[in-house]
Amino acid sequence: MKDNKEATLALGTQPIGKLLWQYALPGVIAMTASSLYNMVDSIFIGHGVGSMALAALGISFPLMNIGAAFGAAVGIGGSTLMSLRLGQRQYDKANNVLGNMVALNIITGLLVGIVSIIFLDEILTFFGASEQTLPHAREYMFILSAGNVVTHLYLGLNAALRSASKPRAAMIATIVTVVLNTILDPIFIWPLHMGIKGAAIATILAQVIVLSWQLWQFSRQRELLHLEWRFLKPARVIVKDIVSIGISPFAMQITGCVVAIFMNNALMKYGGDLAVGAYSIANRLGFVFFMVIIGICQGFQPIAGYNYGARNMDRVKHVLKLTVTASVIAMTVGWIIGEVFPKACVHMFSDDQNLIDIAVRGIRINMLVFPVIGYQAVITNFFQTIGKVRISIFMSLSRQLIFLLPMLLLFSAMWGLDGVWASLPASDLASFLVAVIIMQRFKLSRQEPETTQTNH
């Protein structure tokens, strides 16, 4: 426990650049591996099952987002609150938060999974599934919904590992999951002839194996953060604090789900199933670079949360500046690849020439202003990390509901399929400008931590 406590206290004393590298690098590696898994999964499905199965992945995306929304509300809310408590050196309260987070993940994971299974066909049809894509989407999402509680616990405990000053353990957990899934995917799809259902089984099985290891990590009483039976009973005040912090990523995921429904229906209207498949490919490609930002922000969160809880505002400013710089650079690399080599990227997923032509044009339009996403994402994460719930919620909603949805409806009516694609970079640019304005008006040196006064 002494080593764990020293690692946590180092968040307030070690050089910021060294800390961000130490915490962000495992997160970037883990998230890049995770996004590469999504790409590999899509590649196996595209070549092993077909173009309609790729389109089915796009149809399934909103439903996966709903599950991810509840998982993010609990996982991010709980891990952020743990970082704040550790910054205040309230270690017993941090363990209380961990127990409550596990209990909430079990409850929400089961409820979301059961409801999804009961209404699966109706949900997928509402999300834009056609007669050709519904069977594939149903097979895929039935398995993922049945294993939803596993996914929630796996992601939540990985966030807890980072808050417990174990970024390397969180990285190992993600990489092992990816490797296992990459090995199991082709086995279930080809030799076992299970198609897209096999890809879903591989995903859940890999998570089950790694979740067992995570639970073992947190069962050791000598760890600074560890699971105790007495803390597994949800406490109203802690649940309220977790939800109040987690509401921002929850809102972002849910609005993403709403927009994805409109996006899928617009793509079906102006381009058919192949356009939905092309969007699925573009999403997977962009997701690789966005996950790099998430990895950087995962390294940023415990450093900023701890120092904000300890009121070391100069250190908070420093880590924020470094995080923004790194994120913008990462998205600029993505922009170059997307604009210069889109055809090579699409060829990895499919040999269908019609699908390739639609996806290449879509990727070039979609990634037109990619670098600005880095700034907007970090600033949104920053306000979430320091407990400024209203600001982070507004910034989460601004891109999706305030800008993207109206632009999608307007641009698609004006320019058809190109208008659907163009709404994406236009909303990215608008939300970037909003983030710049909000950050210019925010005076960090005058702020007091909002969640530090709550007594549990």
Image: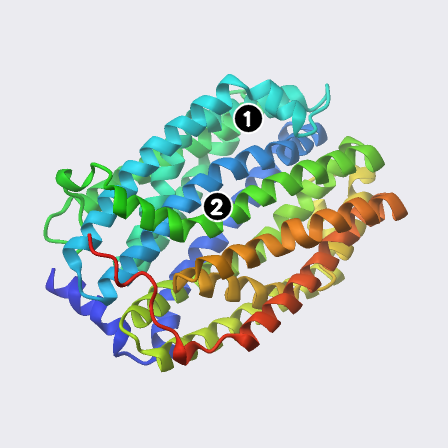
Residue 38 x %, y %: 54, 43
Residue 317 x %, y %: 42, 78
Q: Is residue 88 left or right of residue 270?
A: left
Residue type (three-letter) at the residue carrying disc 1 = Tyr
User: In the rendered view, would you say 438 is above or below 262?
Assistant: below
Q: Nearer the viewer, residue 247 or 342?
A: 247
Which corner quadrant of the image does residue 202 belong to? top left
Q: Which residue is mark 1?
A: 140
Q: Residue at x 33, y 31 (%)?
A: 107
Residue type (three-letter) at the residue carrying disc 2 = Phe
Which corner quadrant of the image does residue 353 belong to? top right
Which corner quadrant of the image does residue 312 belong to? bottom left
Gap in angstroms between the C-alphas marked 1 and 2: 23 Å
Q: Residue at x 50, y 17 (%)?
A: 118
Of the numbered discs 1 and 2, the one sitting upstream in the chain is 1
Q: Is residue 284 left or right of residue 262?
A: left
**Element at badge 2?**
helix
Q: Which mark is residue 250?
A: 2
Quadrant containing the N terminus is: bottom left
Tell me the colour scheme of the image: rainbow
Q: Is residue 388 left or right of residue 127?
A: left
**Element at badge 1?**
helix
Residue 143 x %, y %: 48, 24
Residue extending furthest right? Answer: 414
Q: Is residue 197 left or right of residue 339?
A: left
Q: Residue at x 60, y 72 (%)?
A: 436
Residue 427 x %, y %: 70, 57
From this viewpoint, is residue 173 visible?
no
The crowd level at tag 2 (other Cα within 10 Å; few <14, some 14-19, many 20+) is many
Q: Nearer the viewer, residue 322 or 111?
A: 111
The crowd level at tag 1 (other Cα within 10 Å; few <14, some 14-19, many 20+) is many
Q: Nearer the viewer, residue 344 or 264?
A: 264
